[in-house]
Image (spheres, rainbow, N blue to C red):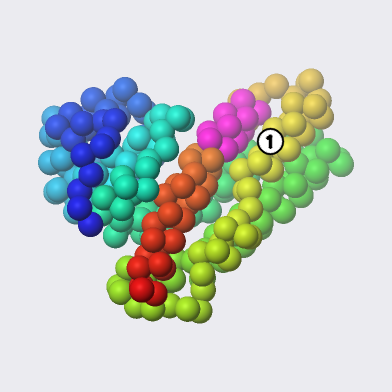
Amino acid sequence: MKSTKSRLFSSDARLSDLITAHPSLLALLTRLDISLGFGDRSIADVCEASGVDTDFFLLICNVYTFNNYVPSTAAILGTDMTGLVSYLEKSHRYYVDKRLPHIESHLDAIAQNLGGRIGQVFISFFKEYKHEVETHFKHEEHDVFPHIRALMAGERDVTYSIGEFIDTHSDIEGKLDDLLNIVFKYLPPQVDDDNVLDVVYDILRLREDLKKHTFIEEKIMVPLVQHLEHAILL
């Protein structure tokens, strides 16, 4: 795909300056196979050394940084998207293997201090949510991502359609608002420790990250796959 010139960050800027100005982007580096230790090198140089398409990197950074940034279909099709599925899969692993267990450990500590019914409410609610997220991701990894890989390889895959994804895609970040409301409304006032502050902060951060993840799937992945499906059937 032809490289797009439309972007909000410049490829010749230093990556260290970008991360310093927008610390939330630090969590994206491992999902894009970019390691620390890049010194004063530019974004373009670091991406090239890491085997990451620069325009794809900038596109993801733009999405995570600017809430009003919605890439056009032309910009999506003008960017090398071969790393998209890998990025999404690594995001799944980041949520399931790191962020959710981290939150769960704080909730376990809070529940142990509380005891009784309210403590069990926290644990039960979160375990149900965690199972819902894992089921959501497994569907994408089993059905959606193989379909995309097949289309990108030029194969005509009629076993699945991105229309099915559109019809069934659920909101996995919204339920975190319910968990926050439980914390805010029902946590006894005597429970005031670092675990509470940490878990609220972690839930808020995960919620925002998942919103961006959902945005990438619905506003970038879907238009791309619709184009590929149409092209392969011509």
Residue 205 in view in this figure: yes
Q: In which quarter of the image is the C terminus?
A: bottom left
Vertical position of residue 120 compared to residue 86: above or below: above
Is-magenta flag for residue 111?
A: no
Nearest the viewer among 48 and 97 is 48
Residue on which the image places disc 1: 177
Give the number of marks: 1
Nearest to the observer: residue 66 or residue 28? 66
Q: Residue at x 14, y 32 (%)?
A: 12
Which of the two residues, 228 or 201, is positioned nearer the viewer here? 228
Residue at x 58%, y 32% (from the top left corner): 204
Q: Residue at x 50, y 79 (%)?
A: 159
Q: Residue at x 51, y 64 (%)?
A: 162
In the rendered image, the residue lying farthest to the front is 234
Range covered by the magenta-colored residues: 196-208
Write down the quadrant of residue 163 in the picture.
Answer: bottom right
x, y (%) of residue 125?
Answer: 75, 47
Image quadrant assignment for residue 109: top right
Q: Does the magenta stretch include residue 198?
A: yes
Q: Where is residue 103 in the image (x, y as percent from the top left)?
A: 59, 41
Q: Is residue 14 visible?
A: no
